Image: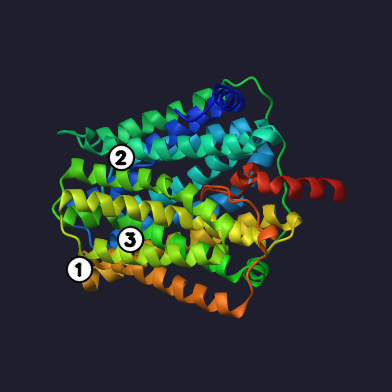
Amino acid sequence: MRGLSLSARGGLFAAVQPVRSLLLSIFMLMAGSGFLATLISLRLERRGTGTIAIGIVATAYFAGLIIGALRAGSVIRRVGHIRAFAAFVALLSASTLAYALLAHPLFWTGLRLIDGICVAGVFVCLESWLNDRSAPDVRGSVLAAYMVALYSGQAIGQLLLGASGTLPAIPFQLASMLVSLAIIPLCLTRSSAPAPIRASAFTIRSLLRASPLGATGAFATGAMLGAFYGLAAVHVRRLGLDLAETARFMMIVILGGVMLQWPLGRLSDRYDRRRVIIASFAAAALISLALALQGSSGGMLLILGALFGGLCFALYPLCVAHCNDRLLESERVAASGRLVLLYSIGAALGPVCAAGFMTFAGTGGLFQFIALCALLALAFGLWRQKASPPVPDHEQQEFQIVPRTTPMASLLDPNTLDARATEGRAS
């Protein structure tokens, strides 16, 4: 990086060095499992499965994420991080191979539910381990490296869509191999397992009362991105794109998701964060409508896809930052779990609702649904802007990019350090 000094680069390398094996595990896991949603949707579409059924299969994965995020902690406390991680990865690898045994929507719905539970369990293990291995003064660097590993693995994994050739089982086999290999760096680590973290209780009702826009925005973002991950590949295939072009489109959207998060976050630090959230929802609605009307023109479709990813991926961390502005320090860690839950509930509902739109409105129904979600969130945000005063500039927390995985990821956010210190003193 040209503008980065040697000392800064050395500091970043030193920050990431203790967790490099964990980051490698995350990269391989996402490269192996991150493209399955696209692959499964395409396979079902090719077999003539109805759009509603494809949406239900996609919903099962996000339902599994909810179950896994709620139950993984108890498994980890019972058997420890390494055993739990190995069990989740082994089951995920087996379920990935099982897709090649029987191509039936009902069978694949059950497998996607298992996938979601396993992925949530793996993320809880990895994120709590990252938190334990990261010194307080380098958490921002570790979180940035984690996001790079997460998104780059997911983006590169899309290229495996075209690996089947004449053997349809090959992509599932490659995915299973990558998922299985992800276990090696963590199981060979010499560091001791982290102690389980118990956050204080915080209800969704309390979150809605503290930050209505942040909570509603997280739910709406989940519905938008859940619909996208579940059905976007079907949408572009119906436009006439071949498999390689579909993989390229999905990869561009995911990489575009990294593009605007930092600039929009910095902007929200300088101005009323609600205005940035509202403007982002408005722009996402316009881009979604443009995608709903866009044909298979390659260049423009990719540009719109990159902008869509940049805007929609930025919305969740913006909503998290807005919630943190309105919460006490001791509430932020626990509230992050409710935000992830709201996002996941939205993501579970999104594919089924979008499938209904596609059934009645045609191929463009996917992005019409996403635009409707953005417009509803926009209208709610405009009302909240009039109903309550903004947070004073000096009370706003610094924006931090956070993933939409599990509550454990929030513990890497430097803004939660004071919260953990306060909880430690209180105990």
Q: Which residue is mark 3?
A: 55
Horizontal side, residue 255 vs residue 141: left or right? left
Residue 410, image x, y percentages: 62, 47
Screen quadrant of the N terminus: top left
Answer above or below: position of 184 versus 292: above
Q: Earlier in the sequence, mark 3 or mark 2?
A: 3
Tell me, for residue 158, which label it has, or none.
2
Question: Residue 393 occupies which quadrant of the picture?
Answer: bottom right
Q: CA distance from mark 1 to mark 2?
A: 25 Å
Q: CA distance from mark 1 to mark 3?
A: 14 Å
Q: Secondary structure at mark 2?
A: helix
Q: Is disc 1 in contact with disc 3, using a CB cutoff of under 8 Å? A: no
Label 3 neighbourhood size at 10 Å, few (<14), some (14-19), many (20+)? many
Residue flagged by tag 3: what amino acid is it?
A: Gly
154 or 39, which is in the foreground?
154
Residue 231, image x, y percentages: 30, 57
Horizontal side, residue 94 vs residue 420: left or right? left
Answer above or below: position of 407 versus 10: below
Q: Is residue 284 visible?
A: yes
Q: Earlier in the sequence, mark 1 or mark 3?
A: 3
Tell me, for residue 362, which label it has, or none.
1
Q: Secondary structure at mark 3?
A: helix
Q: Secondary structure at mark 1?
A: loop
Label 1 or label 3, whichever lies nearer to me, is: 1
Q: Is disc 1 in contact with disc 2, using a CB cutoff of under 8 Å? A: no
Q: CA distance from mark 3 to mark 2?
A: 20 Å
Residue 20, image x, y percentages: 54, 25
Residue at image position (79%, 45%) is 421
Residue at image position (25%, 49%) is 302
Q: Is residue 94 visible?
A: no
Residue flagged by tag 2: what amino acid is it?
A: Gln
Residue at image position (67%, 69%) is 210
